[in-house]
Image (spheres, rainbow, N blue to C red):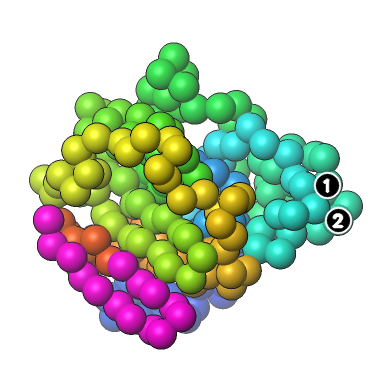
């Protein structure tokens, strides 16, 4: 049940008819795993923490680097060379000490993915490579877990919700992963610093809607170009 601290902290949620006490209880009881604590992961983690998601998992094997700081807003220069998951946990626990944060300082592989995903209700994919994306997608299908998907490149972001209440998955759009050499990479092609914040916040929004039971993207890929504010919804 909600405690007095919940009523005080989440009072603006409670005033929204579509959320209310029952919706906040769903958020409090939810278990969400965020894969990747980088550009997308940072705003996703911040908003899910602020919203009161009861158990939040973070998977990332990387350390903080100076070139991360222009877009990965959980970190400062004091975090350089330290594990992202540990630094993210420190910041998030200060933001909301009421939730449980579990960290997995390891790379997602075929051998460990089911163990990592098993305790969580919803998976959020903020990773930066296609091999992991397809592994996560296929495992979510196998385990029956909804997947919130996002990607970024230069000025453009993509967003979808897969495998939710019978909806399709990533392979319905792209049956096979493209060759690695053909995939745009922000480490080589760049990304505007604020774009991960925009798309990551949208991913957090869809995640909360999945938790509460509100309408979400269904068999649609949202393609959002922030250069000219062009938004497309592609059905698949």
Secondary structure beneath dot 2 equals helix
| Residue 226 on the magenta span | yes
Magenta segment range?
223-236
Residue in the image at 36% along x and 61% along y:
158
Left or right: residue 107 versus residue 159 is right
Residue count near mark 1 (Cα–Cα under 10 Å), binned few <14, some 14–19, many ≥20: some
Label 1 close to label 2 by CB (< 8 Å):
yes
Residue in the image at 21% along x and 70% along y:
233
Q: Position of residue 225 (x, y in %)?
A: 39, 74
Q: Quadrant of residue 5?
A: bottom right
Label 1 sits on residue:
80
Residue in the image at 15% along x and 44% along y:
172
Label 2 sits on residue:
77
- Inter-mark Cα distance, 1 to 2: 5 Å
The circle drawn on residue 120 is none
Q: Quarter holding the N terminus?
A: bottom left
Residue count near mark 2 (Cα–Cα under 10 Å), binned few <14, some 14–19, many ≥20: few
Residue 52 visible from this viewpoint: no
- Residue at the far top in the pictured view: 111
Q: Is residue 198 above or below residue 191?
A: below
Residue 233 visible from this viewpoint: yes
Q: Quadrant of residue 163?
A: top left
Q: Quadrant of residue 140?
A: top left
| Residue 163 on the magenta span | no
Q: Quarter holding the C terminus?
A: bottom left
Q: Tell me the chief SS of the magenta region.
A: strand
Q: Position of residue 136 (x, y in %)?
A: 36, 34
Numbered-mark total: 2
Secondary structure beneath dot 1 equals loop
Left or right: residue 39 versus residue 127 is right
């Amino acid at each position: 049940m909600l405690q007095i601290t919940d009523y005080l902290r989440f009072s603006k949620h409670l005033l929204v008819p579509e959320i209310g006490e029952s919706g906040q209880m769903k958020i409090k009881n939810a278990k969400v795993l965020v894969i990747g604590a980088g550009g997308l992961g940072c705003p996703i983690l911040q908003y899910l923490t602020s919203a009161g998601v009861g158990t939040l998992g973070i998977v990332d094997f990387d350390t903080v680097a100076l070139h991360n700081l222009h877009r990965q807003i959980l970190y400062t220069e004091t975090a350089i060379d330290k594990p992202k998951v540990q630094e993210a946990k420190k910041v998030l626990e200060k933001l909301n000490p009421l939730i449980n944060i579990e960290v997995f300082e390891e790379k997602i592989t075929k051998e460990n993915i089911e163990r990592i995903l098993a305790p969580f209700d919803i998976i959020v994919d903020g990773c930066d490579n296609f091999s992991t994306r397809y592994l996560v997608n296929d495992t979510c299908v196998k385990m029956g877990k909804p997947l919130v998907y996002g990607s970024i490149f230069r000025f453009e972001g993509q967003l979808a919700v897969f495998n939710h209440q019978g909806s399709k998955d990533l392979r319905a759009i792209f049956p096979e992963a493209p060759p690695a050499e053909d995939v745009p990479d922000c480490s080589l092609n760049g990304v505007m610093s604020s774009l991960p914040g925009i798309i990551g916040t949208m991913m957090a929004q869809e995640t909360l809607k999945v938790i509460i039971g509100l309408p979400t993207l269904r068999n649609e890929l949202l393609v959002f170009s922030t250069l000219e504010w062009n938004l497309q919804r592609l059905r698949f």
